[in-house]
Amino acid sequence: MPDDPKVDPNVDPNADPNVVKVDNKTNPPAYTPPEIDMATAVPPEFREKPYFKDKSFVDVMKEHDNLQTLLGKRPEGIPTKDSSEEDWSKFLTSLRPEKAEDYVLPETDYSKAKGRSEEYIKDVKEILYNADVNKRQAEKILTGFEAFLGKATTFNDSQSAEATKAREEEFEALLDKTYTGQKQVVIDRTKKLMTDSVDPGLKDKVAGVLKDIPNDTLFALTAVLDGVYKKHIAEDKPPEGGDGSSGGDVATLQAEAETIMKSKAYSDFREAGHDAARLRVRELFGNIAAAGKK
C-alpha cells in the first residue's frame, strides 16, 4: 500500500489526538517555587538575621540577585583605572577640605618632643591640600611621617654625639702631644691670660665660657695665645735694672699696650717715638707677665 502523503510519519499513531504537545524550549512551563520551610531550612545562627527572618525562598533568591547586581556596579562618580586625569582630579578634590587651613594635625610623639613651628604647620597643610588628601588620610600620613622623622632625628643626634666625642678625644690627644707634661700649665695660663685681658665686668662671664669650652676650641685658643705669650710676653720681659714696675691692673696694662700697638708711632719706624713705643709695649707685657706669676 502506498504511503499516504497526508499522514505524518513522526506522529505516534497510538497517541491520544486530544493531547497538545508542549515544546519546553519555546514554551517553558510556569515556575512553581519549591515547598521549603525557611524557618527550619536556614541554619539556626542565621534565622534571626533580618535578611532571612520571615523571608520565603523566592524572597531570598531575589535579594541575593539584587545584591550581586549592586556589587558589580561602581558607584556613580568614582573613576576607574581608565578614567582621565580630569576625572580623577574632580573626584579627589571633592574629598579634600575646602581650604588647606581646615586640616587638623594630630599630636604625635615627635610633635610633643620637638614642637611644630607655624611655618612647618603651614607647609604641611599646603602639601596635603595640593596632593588632594582627605582629612582621614592626612592624619595617618602625618602620624607615619613624623614617626619616621623622629627615628631619623634620633639617629642623627646619635651620630652627631659620636662625632663630637671622637673630635673631643682627637683634640685631647693633640693637646697631650703638643704640650707633653705641660698641658695643664699651658691651658691654665691661656685661660688666665684671656680672663685677665678683658674688662673686669666681663671677667666672670668669660671664665664661665672657658669652663666648659670644647677641646677643639680650647686647642686653637691655647695654640694661639701660647704663641702670643712666648713671643710678646716671655721674650719681651724688661731687662734687669729697668723701672721694676710690675704693679697695676692687668686689664689696664693690656689696654695701654693695645692702644700703643694701634698707633702709627709703633707700626711705622719712620715716625718719631717709634723706638720708645716699642720699648713701652715690651715693658707693659713684662708687667702683665709678672702680675700673672703672683
Image (cartoon, rainbow, N blue to C red):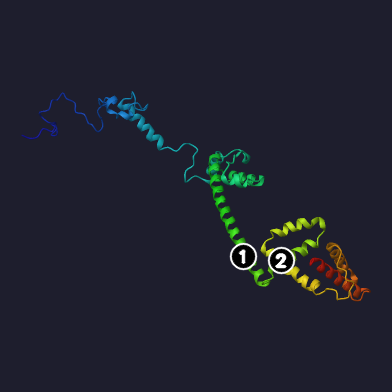
**Secondary structure type for disc 1:** helix
Q: In this view, does 118 lie above or below 244?
A: above
The residues tagged by marks 1 and 2 sit, at their Cα atoms, a distance apart of 16 Å
**Residue 123 placed where, x, y %?**
63, 47
Q: Given the image, on which type of amino acid does mark 1 rest?
A: Glu
Q: Given the image, on which type of amino acid does mark 2 rest?
A: Ile
Badge number at residue 212: none
Q: Within the image, what quadrant is residue 72 found in? A: top left
Foreground residue among 12 and 222:
222
Foreground residue among 172 and 158:
172
Q: Mark 2 points at which residue?
A: 187
Tell me which residue sits at (62%, 61%) in the image.
164
The N terminus lies in quadrant: top left
The tally of labels here is 2
**Residue 194 placed where, x, y %?**
77, 63
1 or 2: tag closer to the N-terminus:
1
Q: In this view, does 43 lie to the left or right of 8?
A: right
Badge number at residue 169: 1
Q: Which of marks 1 and 2 is in front?
A: 2
**Residue 252 placed where, x, y %?**
86, 62
Is the C-beta separation of discs 1 and 2 under 8 Å? no
Q: Is residue 19 left or right of residue 271?
A: left
Foreground residue among 49 and 105:
105
Foreground residue among 163 and 222:
222
Q: How crowded is mark 2: few (under 14 residues within 10 Å), some or many (20 or more)?
A: many
**Residue 244 placed where, x, y %?**
88, 71
**Secondary structure type for disc 2:** helix
Question: Which residue reaches farthest left?
Answer: 1
